[in-house]
Image: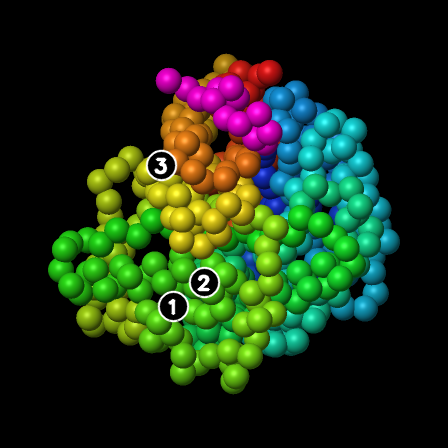
Amino acid sequence: MKPARTDFPEDFLFGAATAAYQIEGSAYGGAGPCHWDSFAATPGNVVRAEDGSVACDHYHRWEGDLDLMKDAGLDAYRFSTSWARVMPEGRGAVNAEGLDYYDRLVDGMLARGLKPFQTLYHWEMPSALADLGGWTNRDVAHWFADFAEVITRRIGDRVAAVATINEPWCVAWLSHFLGHHAPGKRDIRAAARAMHHVLLAHGAAVERLRGMGQPNLGIVLNFDHCTPASDSAADVLTTATQDAIFNRWFIEGITRGTYPAEALAGLAPHMPKDWQADMPLIGQKLDWLGVNYYSRHIHAFAPDTPWPHGRDVPGPLPKTQMGWEIYPEGLYGFLTRLSRDYVGDLPIYVTENGMANADEVLNGSVNDHVREDYLFAHLDATRRAIADGANVKGFFYWSLLDNYEWAFGYEKRFGLVHVDFETLQRLPKASYHALARAIAR
């Protein structure tokens, strides 16, 4: 049975999410360069060396995109504000055109009855700051707090919620240890510093905005269900290490004032000096927590590899276009686990959940029924978590639009709305219409 709005609390919010670099078009409106521009310009990093210079041209087409959300009956829109658009050099001069754009965008949301959920940072580090080390430089915390203040002074009076950073694991580990995302480093020292500094920047921004009187501050963390490949002690330990790096590091840094021992076993020698002194700033009170969830991974011990001595094992479940297993039970597990072990009754939002699919337009429509099944299975997992005590207040599908999917270019389609990247024409998919029917009042 497909969930309906009436299956959720009366104040539950249904929304869609996007990110600035993935949809806006960084070539427009005086935005400065960011590290994704240079990462994409380096051979081998991104499919077809595609970048976000045009993306979905949301910069010019935002009114129609907001209309799509209004017409679907959505309650809220999770968007991000590009640091490089607001402050092209990352520090100093402010781009008035960028501030004006976000002014118009927020006013447009409110005019359509959409609650604006802002994310300050969704992965676009200004190139001038990347030149100074980006997330490996401790000063990034102050640079980020300054940016947070500038954009908040302009639109903070009208947004419903502010998240500091989207998916610190991706910002730090995926980008500095695994090297899959900009800046494309594969260096354990850089990764350890980024893992800490990204939380230090979060804390500095919360402190700055709280001092300005800005309400409803949170962070968006991503979680990946970890399953051992066998019952062997080695596989179980490897899985616990991956869980510590991916799922526990950031939430425990914020809520417990320390990092998990299984992760420090490898990272401690590479951490910044006296990192423990930063934990009170990192651990400031949150007003809400954002949870991004997509999949699970199965982990096995790999003794011939460096720490963390693991390898992924293919799982048996159906997979998305990204090759990710479809495992809704993992979302239920994290919502209840976070509520039980870390945040208690703190409001939680599912800030991203969705699937990539090789969608095709046939006879003027996109019949992505597999995405409908994915979406409704994860909505049902959310409903069950609420029934079991998790204080989940909303669900944002990722993504509103097919967009620039980072290192995968424009090949992977997550959207409720199909985008023709030649003409930029929008076409709502079957999943868009199914969600609109489910949440109709």
Give amino acid for label 1.
Answer: Pro
Write down the region rendered in magenta.
1-13
Q: Looking at the rendering, in which quadrant would you find the C terminus? A: top right
Give the mark toward the camera: 2 or 3.
Answer: 2
Main SS, magenta residues? loop
Label whose residue precedes the other's in the sequence (3 or 1): 1
Give amino acid for label 2.
Answer: Glu
Image disc number at residue 328: 3
Horizontal arrangement in the rendering, residue 265 relative to residue 430 (left or right): left
Q: Looking at the rendering, in which quadrant would you find the N terminus? A: top left
The kind of secondary structure element at disc 2 is helix
Gap in angstroms between the C-alphas marked 2 and 1: 7 Å
Q: Residue drawn 33% across and 61% down?
A: 242
Q: Residue drawn 64% across and 29% down?
A: 75
Label whose residue precedes the other's in the sequence (2 or 3): 2
Image disc number at residue 356: none
The answer to whether the residues at label 3 and label 1 have Cβ atoms under 8 Å apart is no
The kind of secondary structure element at disc 1 is loop
Residue 54 visible (yes or no): no
Horizontal arrangement in the rendering, residue 68 relative to residue 173 (left or right): right
Image x and y of residue 315, in percent: 24, 45
Name the residue tied to disc 2.
252
- Local crowd size for mark 2, using a 10 Å CA cut-off: few (<14), some (14–19), many (≥20): some
- Local crowd size for mark 3, using a 10 Å CA cut-off: few (<14), some (14–19), many (≥20): many
Gap in angstroms between the C-alphas marked 3 and 1: 26 Å
Give amino acid for label 3.
Answer: Pro
Q: Farthest residue toward the left?
A: 232
